[in-house]
Each structure stands twice: as structure tokens, then as C-alpha cells.
Image (cartoon, rainbow, N blue to C red):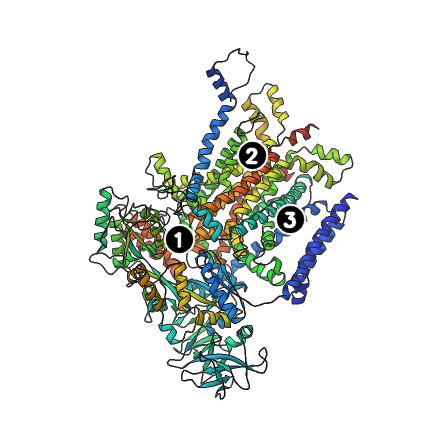
Amino acid sequence: MAPSSPRPAWSRPSAARRAAAWVGRDGWRHLVMLVVLVFALFPILFVVSAALNPLGTLSSSSLVPRSVGADNLVELLTRTRFGAWYANSLLIALANSAATVFLSAMAAYVFSRFRFAGRRLGLYGLLMVQMFPQFLAIVAIYLMFSVVGEHWPQVGFNTRTGLLLVYLGGALSVNTWLMKGFFDTVPRELDESAQVDGASHAQVFFRILLPLVTPVLAVVGLLVFISTVNEFLIASVFLRDPGAKTVAVGLYGMVADQRDANFGMFSAGTLLLAIPVLAVFWYLQRYIVSGLTTGAVKG
Amino acid sequence: MFPLYAAGQWLGVGVVAAATALIFYVYLSRRAIPAKYLLPGTLLLVAFQIVPVVYTLSTSVTNYSDGHRGAKEQAVDQIEASSVVRTEDAAEYTLTVAARGPAATGELVFLLTAPDGTAYAGDAEGLTRLEGAEVGPTGRITEAPGYTVIPAGEANARSAEITKFAVPTGTGTGIRSSGFSSAYEGRSTRVYDAACDCVTDTETGRVYTADDERGAFVAGNGDRLAQGWQVNVGVANFTRFLTDPVTGTSFFGILAWNIAFAAVSTAGVFAVGLGVALTLHTPRRLAGRTAYRLLVVLPYAMPAFAMFLLWRSMFNTDFGLVNRLLGTDVDWFGEPWAARAAVLAINVWIGFPYMFLVATGALQSIPRELVQAARIDGAGAWQAFRSITLPLLMVAMAPILVATFAYNFNNFNAVWLTTAGGPFPPDNPMAGATDLLITYTYRLAFGVGGAQYGYAAALSVFIFLIVTLISLVSLRRSAALEEVHR
Amino acid sequence: MRIRRVGALAGTAALALAATACGGGAEGSGQDEATMVIWADPERTEVLQPFAEEFGSANGIRVEVREVAVDTIQADFVTAHESGTGPDVLVGAHDWIGNLVQNGAIDPVELPEDRLAAFDEAAVEAATYDGRLYGVPYAMENLALIRNTDLAPEAPESIEDMVATGTRLREDGEVEEALGLQVGQVGDPYHMQPFYTSAGGYLFGTDGEGGYDPADLGVGSPESVEAFERLADLGEEGQGVLKRSIDSENVAGLFERGETPYFITGPWSLGAVQEAGVPYDISPVPGFEDGEEASPFITVQAFFVASGSSNKVLAEEFVANYVADPELATALYEADPRPPALTEVLEEVSQDDPDVGKFIDAGENGQPMPAIPEMNAIWDPFGKAQAAVIGGEDPEQAVQTAAEAFRDESG
């Protein structure tokens, strides 16, 4: 990074100098990003290539498919109930990320601002629960929900509500730690002075702190959205009806069979699944980068 | 709560009542402010995470596994039910299920047509000739005086009765149904006797005695019946792991690599993620910033399991793109260190967008004024970053780094879907060079010998203890986490 | 005051949630229409649907076919059985039988003798476990050799013959690989079985009644060491015909692009080969010149009756008396061309499609894949031993290591 010390103004800067200045200011950023994008995107180009390749193989040896066509997409949309899966995925992911952000922010608020018995245990406990291998607990969840489903069929197997409940069991998690870290960066003086002015704890939370940590709410929302959309281990246990599946479960079914995995349809589905993720990110990124914090700290 | 009450599930009623009471108490009282915020998430956490974990851990002292899943009664039922053999050369009948009286409740009768066309009625007493029956085109009796023919749907509702029902035809033999349209004469060859707690095979005369320590019926010569049941085995699962010869020789190697894997993965995703976030973090307008952000997030938006498979084929020795691009001939998944490097590279690729997102958010919430003030005070860009940005960043990110470490410590898919733990030394197919504790124990518990949940639970207790210990030590040493202790 | 309001609000919401749960629960328990549920993997779900519906409407019951991913269906079925939420009928492979039986998850099926006789003998043998028939077979599959007739016009007489042709083509630069046989980093015993058996090896011996005997493990025997030596000779340090870098993901592509003349695979690959437009022919996997007959594994797809079914009369009727129907077998074949297990249907479809007959011929010397639970304990180390030997490790040590791992595991 070049130091931007004051320099004499040039009346007619040469092209080379302008280029040097460009590289010095922002050009290097573009160069770095170019390298990063190559690293980040070239495996994904294979997915695009497989989606366009009617033969349906995921070949890593050549980027250009031998023939190009929309067969996979057409097949995906006509032969499977992709539309229903898609709607399910979006619904569950949106509901889960909204609820998780809210539950997690509440917990992060008290972990950051209050001192109470069991606080430390709670924080460490959240980390430790995460360390338990999930594929083991799945049998217990299975047994549990077969009992639950007997009494309350609408939250049992094959219901989105039941699946959402299980996901919400993980609402307090690493995300809570993440949020707590952000709450910690907001100076305490802010809410203390508000409380002196007579604000209740709820007002401090909703009116003062939440707006200040909008970036992390957006980040957590996005992270949860992505992980929910991609989750298939629990979803595959829960959702069995062909119309009730999520995209991840449906896609996994296509490639689970090594012997006739259909990577073409799978890749087309994967790319379609990336669209809402990017849309959500595009929508949220204005919150992630909004200058709200600066203004608030000033005031 | 009503369905639980109706079903007499008093434990369930109690739990629901307690949870409801807790909700009322917390939200109606003025005190317990933290609880108001924590309760909803905590209740869900307890119900859908902690309870399953505790349940699983409780199976670590049992032999819960394939072949030992249910109760002894179920095993006995299943042994008897699957031991029915058809009598050699006996007649096969066409069956109509009927009842004396109403179809739903009347005494069951099998109306049978023998191959020669003779009609019989069979009940719990035995077979009698049936006169005056009407026989349909397929040979099935459609009507018979004195009997109500049970239609398929209603017969199905009485499945439990019908499948148990046998029309006695001699000692031990009876005519049983196979579906609702055919019947055969057969006999049960294995019989359970509660008096000796044993199963006798009437064909071979062999006696299998219940072994309540193993959860199986075992004969004198050591043969056992396939169907077993779940029993308590105490600490056997734990000692089995500790005395496993492979574990003895390879445990510390696996542990060391596991720690290195988690640490390097965490450092890698942090460095790349933060680097990218810093690159895009400038107060000035940066052309294409939104596009950059969107594209960088893409690896994270792809289903991870598919990306692991894709990377695996990119690292293929002869056909993979990596060797082709680099012009090398590395046997990536065949050489221990090459495999380790490959797994790490893949894992960084998968994980860095996550760190990028978190770092971007964290950078945004650091007041610009602080950095600007430092710069005005004469600090260079690097110095301002070191002394202002990074420390503030670490406050927000340190917990995430710990969590990322813990996550990667147990990152099953990253190894299982790429190298599957390999390469394996030629003298040991059970512990490979890239094995994490979790993949190693998964292989022990599920890869060989079916699904052994009890054993797996015992193994996860060990992993759990190790991870917890490591995390706690690193948390305690981390000054950035002093907030937790304040 | 304000605290109160927020608290009361949240409390009310929680109560409302609880209330909907309770109220709804009472409602839900009212509808109790019997539904027979069939689990199948994604390939077969769609095909079964119309037949399931026909069976349902004929018998006044709702029938649902649910698809479960192929790699989890067996474990899910056992867990679902345990929790009492399993299906009534399962569609799956015969080599699951051992595990399903030890978990008490399926019931034996009684087929009248005339109906049993309509099935291919090998299929019935495969679906028979411990002397009882546990499933009604509908399709069989085994490996065969598919060759690119442009590159290799004649079916090879022996492995040596095949290797010679393949190597010559590779040296001439016409192909990249001499042979398309998937190995992968952890080996693939299923695809290696014809070579292994032809070289004199066996996996499990058989007991008196034709079943496999877990006490007689062939891995570790002198024959298996000799067989592994032959594999090593074909391996990376030998003739370079068997390679770990050829795996399940790239092998089909190699053949479809004409980069290898030979492809050892099953009927599942045929569709893609035809689509790729490679001129091909099918012949049995050859054996070594002086060796035994190459004997591929035969796997049978079958219908099973779940022992935990609450609609067992119908489930039994469906499996024992309905799915043995030639029409259903034909439809299943058309949706997913694997050789049908009903002899009559098999003959019929072989006339229209000679490939089916060729696959069946290739399975002539086949052995059913062992269904005994002990298979789990040898499969993984056995595969790794093959991969190690192909990579150049010592055969004797690799074989003994695998045998030892099996003994450790099975106690």
C-alpha cells in the first residue's frame, strides 16, 4: 500500500504515472481480487460446464464440454418436482435464518451486557454442544420425532415445521458467539447513558443495539440461510414425500448412487440453488456495508 | 398437551407442563431479565440438541448396534416368525379371509380352495369341508353360507390377527396366510420357551440359550441366532477402544494431525478471508465491489458435499486438473504429505468465504474515525491496521476462530469425501495419514461390522473430552476472550 | 411497565404456539386412513407409482411410494423400523438381507412353488438367506466387459489377450488407458471380483447349504496371495493396466470419450454409453489364460415385507402375489434396463434388446454377493489391500493385513 502523502499537483501527468497512481490507490485491489477469483471460481466453472453438458458427467479434465445444451435443465424441471423442492428450501431457509437471527441476537445481548449465574457455563456450553458429531445424534432425533409425530402429526416426520424446529435447536450456537463479539465492540457507555435516560432493557436492545450491529445480523442471516439451503443430513431423514423435499435432499439423491450419478442435472440444480443465495447476499450486503455504525458512534 | 394426556404419556405431560410453567414464570415476573432473552432459544436447544446428545451418550454403556437394537421380546417374536417353513410337498391353497359374524370383529376363518378345487373352512379348531361355496374365476371363494367375506381393506385392518393366525393341521403345523389371497401349510421350527429362557430348533434339536450379557441366543457350540437385543455392557465399549491395538499405535499420530489440520485450516481461512475483506474494504468507491463480493461468496453457496467430490477428481493423479495445470505428476492422494496438503487446500477453498463474510461485517463495525484519527496522528497504514483495526477485529472474531477450530477439528466431510482418511500404510487399513479422530472412529464404529451406535457413542465421549480440553485451554490462553470471564 | 408489555407479548406468543400445537394434534389424530408406504430409491420411485396406485385402488387403500437416497436407504429403514415409523414394503438389494434379518426388520416371504419356479434360479438363491426366501426378486445385475468395437473388434479370450490389445493401443497413442476398470484410492472389491476369482482367490467359502460361511475367509489364504500377485503384475508398478487413479467418477468418461477400449461395468452404465455414441459390444469378463473362470458378483434387486408393517396383510399380498407380475417386471425394465428376474420376461426383453441377454451370459459364472453381516468387516480392508497392491505394495503383507483387520473386528 502506497502512503498517500501530499504531492505536488501535476499539470499533465503522463500515462505511466497515472497507471502507477492507479495501481497504488485501487489497482492493487483489482489485481488481488483477480487472483482470488481465479482460485475461488475455477472449480465452479466445472459445475457450469457439467450443467451444460448433456452427457451428465462431472469431468475434471476439461473445462469445455463436448456439446452444449439445456437438456439437463429441462430434464430437471420436468422430470423432478424441482419447483416444489425449491419453494420448500427457500421457505425453510428464510424462516430459519429470520428466527435464528432473532433468537441468537437476544441471547448475544444478555451474554454481552448482563452478568448472571450460568453465563460462562452457557457460553462454553454452546461451543461444546457443537463439538458433538451430528451423525450420531440423528438416530436420537429420529426416535424422538417418531414419538412426537404420534401425538402431534403436524410437527412430526414429513413436516416442514418439524424440520424447522430441529434446525432452531441450533439457533443458539457459534452464531451467538459471533454476535456477542459484535455486541462487545459497541461501547457500553451508549446503552448505559440510554438507561440513565430511562430506557428499558428492551428498548436498549431493540432501539439502540440492534441497529448498531446490523452488519452482523445480516452476516448471520446469510450464513444461516446458506447452511440451511445446503443441509441434507437431517432434512433427508425428515422429508420423504417426493413433493416435500428440499433442493439439497433432492440433489443429493441424484448423485448418491455412484453407479449412475446424474451430475448434469445435479449441476444445473446446484447453480439454480446458488441464485437465491446470491440474491439474499446482494440484498443483505447493503446492511453489511452500510455506514450506520459510524453515524451512531458519533451521535 | 391434550394428545399426551389422552395417551397417558405422563412423562410427556410433565415436561410440557414444566416448560409452560417456566415460560409463565420468566415472562410474568419482573426479575430474571437475562432469562427472558435466553429462554426461547434455550428451550429449543435443550429439546433438539442436548436431549439427543444425552440420549446418544447414554447408549455408550450398551451394545446398541445392528443386530442389537430392540428389546428381547422383539427378538424372540422375530426369531419365531421367521422360522416358519413350508411343509414339503404340502398343498397350496387359494385363500379368502372371512369371519363368523361382522367383518371387523367376527371370529377369523380362512376359506381355502385346494389345488383340486375342494373348498375348506379353517378356524382355530382345524379344517372342515365347506359345502355350498361360490368360487370365482381365479379359484377364490367369493361367498359361503354362514361366513362374512372380509374385503381387502378391512382384512388389512386386522393384519396383526391374520398374520398370527394358523389353522392347525397336525402337531406344530398349520395353514397360514401369505397376503390375503394365498395360504400354505407350514410349521414354526424355532420355539422359545420362557422356562429355560431358550430357543429350540425343532429341526436340528439344537438349543440356543439366552445370553443376557451379549444380548443373543447362543448354542452350546458357539453358534448364535442372528436376531439379538440391546443389553447393558458397562464400560466394555470404552475398554475396547483403549485396548484396540490399532488405536494404541496410531492414536497420537492421528491426534497430532487432527490438531494441525484444525489449526492450519483455521489460520488459512482466516488469512485468506481477512485478506480479501481488507482488499475490498476502502472508504473510496471501488468499481465492481459488489460483483467481487458476490463472486467470492460463490464457493460457499455451492453444496459442500458436491464440491468435495469435485476437488477429489481435480486432485486425481492422472486425470486431475491440478497436475495438468502445474505440470506435475504428484500422486496427491497416495503420498501422506501430498494428501494432507491437498485436504488443507480444499478445506481453505470451502471455508474462506465464510471468514470473508464475517471479517467484512467486523470491519464495517469498526468506527472509521478511529483509524482516521490514527492516520492523522501520523501512523502509517500498516501501523494503523496493527494497532487499531486488528485488535478491534480480534474482539469480534476471536470467538469465531475458536469455533472454526472446533468445527474443523470434527470436520468429517472434508476428509471423508476427499481422501476417506487415506493414504493408508500397507500394514494398517484402519488408520490413514489424513484421518481425523472423527473419521477414524467413524470407520471403527460404522465402516466395519455394521452400525455400532453404542461403541460410536463411547468413542464420541473420548473425542468430546479431547476437543473440550483443547478448546478450554486455548480459550483460557486467549486474552481476546477475557470478556467471557468478566 | 414496558418490560411487562414485551414479556407478556412473548408469553402470549408462546402460549399461542402451544395452543396451536395441542389443538392441531387433536384434529390430526382424527384422520386415520390406512396408507401402505413403499420405500424405493430415486431410480425406481416413479416407475412403481402407477402400479402401487393400481394395487391400492383395487384393494381400497392408499399406497404411497417414497424415495430415499440410495446410500442411506438401508440404514434409514432399520432406524425407522426401530422407531416404528418405517414403511410397509422396501425395495432394495439382496445383500442387505443379512443385516435386515439380524435387526428383525423384514419377514420371510412365502411364494407358491409354481410362482417361485418362474424366477431365475440365481435370483432366488440370492434372495434366500438362512434357508428362507426373504425377498421377491425383480432384477439382477452383474459385471460384463463392454468394448469399443472400433478399437477392439474382437471379444478378448483372456485377460492377457485384453491387456495385450489395450497396451498396444496405448502405445500406438490411440487410447490413454489400456483398461477401464475402476479401482480408486481405497480399492473396489466389487469390480475386482472377476479378476480376483479368476486368479484363484475367493472371499468366503460356502457352507453345506449353499450359503456363505463367515468362518471360512478366503482372504489371507495362499490362493488369495497368489491372486494378489497377479493383480500386482497388472498394477502400477507392473504393466500399468490397473491404476488407482481410475475411479468410479472418471471411468465412464474415459470409455465414452474413446480413451480406453475396454470398460468393465454393469448394465447401469449402458444408457450413457449409448448416448455417447460409442460403437460397443458386450461380452463376459474374461479370465486369466491358465486361471479359473472369472466370476463376477450377482446382485439382485428385490421387494421386502417390513416386519414392523401395520398393513402386513396388504404388504404381503403386494410382495408375494402382485409384484411377481410379468407386466410390472416389464415396466420396471423399461424404466431402468436391468435384466428382469422373471425368466419369461427376461426372454422376452432379450429378444428386443440383445444387450440384456449378453449381460445375463456374462453372469453365468457369477456368485451372489454375500449377504452375511460379516461382509462389512472384510469389504473395507479387502478393498484397501487391493488398492495397496495395485499401487506397488507387497501382496503377502497386504492380504495378511486385511485378514487380520477382519479377525480383529469379528472377534
Label 3: which residue? B41
**Image quadrant containing the C terminus of chain B:** top right
Tag 1: amino acid: Asp
Residue lying at the far right in this picture: please name it: C1
In the figure, is residue A30 to the left or right of B20? left
- Does the rendering let one see residue B64? no
Q: Give the structural element (helix, strand or loop) at label 3.
A: helix
| Residue C52 % position (x, y) | 48, 65
Q: Label 3 marks which chain's residue?
A: B
Q: CA distance from mark 1 to mark 2?
A: 41 Å
Q: Label 1 marks which chain's residue?
A: A
| Disc on the earlier residue, 3 or 2 | 3
User: Pointer 2: residues within 10 angstroms few (<14), some, or many (20+)?
Assistant: many
Q: CA distance from mark 3 to mark 2?
A: 26 Å
Label 2: which residue? B359
Tag 2: amino acid: Ala
Question: Is residue B396 or residue C220 the one in the foreground?
Answer: B396
